[in-house]
Image (tube, rainbow, N blue to C red):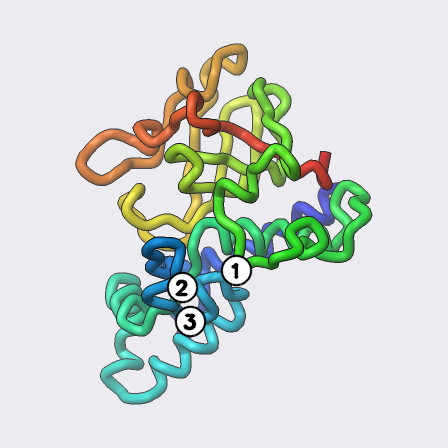
Amino acid sequence: MNNIIDKTSLYLTQYLAMDFFGFKHHCPYWSNRIKEGQVRIRGFLNGKGEAKSIRQELLRLLSETAESRAMAGNQDNLSLLAKRNRIGIDCSGFLYRVWDFLMKHKFRNNKFSDLDNVFPEGINRTNAKSLTDKKVAVRINKINEIRFADCFRLNGGRHIAFIKEITAEKLIYVHASSSLTLIRGVHEGEISLHDREKNLADQEWREEAPNGGTLKKYFKPRKGDGIWRLKAFA
């Protein structure tokens, strides 16, 4: 098991610490703009791309001029460049990529060759709600039952994160976020576990949210938020 966890950690690093001419930055965020069920503004690879493809496209833009190359030294400037060119990844695209990586490495001896076997419409037709639909996932109700590769659903099913690690003291998740957090893009967040017998809402959420408070303000268990596990990994 440790082998696949180590491999997954390296895979996550491709999003968490992209290399641009020696500077390490997290992958920017992008989500297609949708209205009335139709994509109105479409991003590079629909905001669902592999880290390698996203990095290569950003490197191409950064290499065009000396001025653009200088942007590689600053995360905020890189994020602006990415936003102008609609480059990045959204929360469901990121989780899909990580789960697909695990599936291809036969995590938990699952029987599928890739995640498209679980979601026949593919990565571009999934979102946080469909990834935690009861047809494909089961809800985990106790902190002591949470494990690596579970997902963390938030904001009434409009946001999702990957559980990277859980110990006696903390839960570490990785997600691609935008307006919910101070950091835009793929990054880690943490919840300190002071009493594992209590619910997640009673723990210490460490990640700050804009306009004060923490990410806990977007945790809505009555709307299905919580920890979910893909049935293929159960």
Answer with mark 2 or mark 1, whichever residue precedes in sequence: 2
Give me the residue at 43% from left, 77% from top: 57
Horizontal side of residue 65 vs 87, given as left or right:
left
Answer with mark 2 or mark 3, whichever residue precedes in sequence: 3
Q: Position of residue 22 (x, y in %)?
A: 41, 72
Q: Mark 3 falls on what kind of element?
A: helix
Query: Given contact means CB atoms under 8 Å apart, are the residues at marks 2 and 3 in contact?
Result: yes
Front disc: 2 or 1:
1
132 in relation to 85, above or below: above
217 in relation to 173, above or below: above
Query: Given contact means CB atoms under 8 Å apart, are the residues at marks 2 and 1 in contact?
Result: no
Disc 1 marks a residue whose amino acid type is: Asn
Q: Position of residue 13 (x, y in %)?
A: 52, 57
Q: Quadrant of residue 204?
A: top left
Cα gap from disc 2 to disc 3, whole angstroms: 7 Å
Disc 3 marks a residue whose amino acid type is: Phe
Residue bearing mark 3: 44
Q: Position of residue 203 (x, y in %)?
A: 41, 19
Residue bearing mark 1: 124
Q: Mark 1 falls on what kind of element?
A: helix
Disc 2 marks a residue whose amino acid type is: Gly
